Image: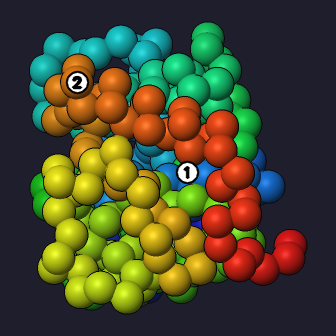
Amino acid sequence: MDEQCRNCPALCETRTTVVHGYGDVGADFLFVGERPSPAADEVGVPFAGGGVGGEDGDGGEDDDEDRLGQRLQRILQRLGLCVTGSDPNRPELANVYLTNLTRCRDPERPPTDDEIGTCEPYLNAEIRMINPEILVPVGERALFELATEYTTRPASEFDVADDHATTIRGRGFELVPMVDPRNQTDDQTQAWVEHFAQLMASDYRQTKGRQKR
């Protein structure tokens, strides 16, 4: 992975760090967000929890984006996939790998289609390297991109709110979409945790023809 990537000149001017994937390289579960948060841009770790010890900030724009990492880490802790009390900027993860559609951040806007396409080889390389059982698209944009690549249905047929806390049979992987944790209601969070816990307790490794590592 290129830590000095210059493929998107506009993003090179706004980023602090190129944020590649992070976590357990033997993981069964790979979570994919849209772009690095402010905290991730600073420390180089996707879904970093920010500098507030995992607590919600004061409501500013950067706090809102970092809250995504904070809340996702809490969900992972409930499932036993993240060590409670570990550094929220470099959490201790087990059986989980975290990444994004794009590696760099513009603080003023989401990534363009061209930028996501330019970063796609990095994401594909991570998916091949990890060879997970389950892909978790976090948010609508990630669901659209992963559904385009890994399902046989048109991506326009999927909706992250409708498909939240469900399992979608894909091509080579199963997808378990998640509404952006910042926007989840308590009921949505509970539904996703319960669904994923049931999946973890099942014979999910036998649900598809998985390539050997």
Please say if the residues under marks 2 and 1 sit with CB atoms less than 8 Å apart: no
Per the image, the residue denoted by label 1 is 98
Secondary structure of residue under mark 2: helix
Residue 6's place in the image compared with 74, above or below, is below
Please state which of residues 154 and 54 is positioned toward the viewer in this rendering.
154
Amino acid at pointer 2: Asp
The residue that appears at 52% across and 83% down in the rendered structure is: 171
In the rendered image of this protein, does residue 34 appear above or below residue 72? below
177 relative position to 122: left or right? left
Please indicate, yes or no, whether residue 191 appears anywhere in the rendered image.
Answer: yes
The answer to which quarter of the image holds residue 206 is: bottom right
Residue drawn at 17 percent across, 26 percent down: 185
Depth check: 135 or 105 in front?
A: 135
Answer yes or no: is residue 9 visible.
Answer: no
Q: Position of residue 97 (x, y in %)?
A: 63, 51
Where does residue 109 sit, x and y in percent of width and height? 14, 60
- 106 displayed left or right of 22: left
State which tag comes first along the sequence, 2 or 1.
1
Residue 187 bears which disc, if any?
Answer: 2
Looking at numbered disc 1 in the image, what kind of residue is underneath it? Leu
Residue at disc 1, secondary structure: strand
- Depth check: give the residue in front, 181 or 50: 181
Tell me which residue sits at (45%, 63%) in the image: 175
Q: Is residue 135 above or below residue 114?
A: above
Relative to 172, is 194 above or below?
A: above
Horizontal and vertical percent position of residue 135: 51, 61
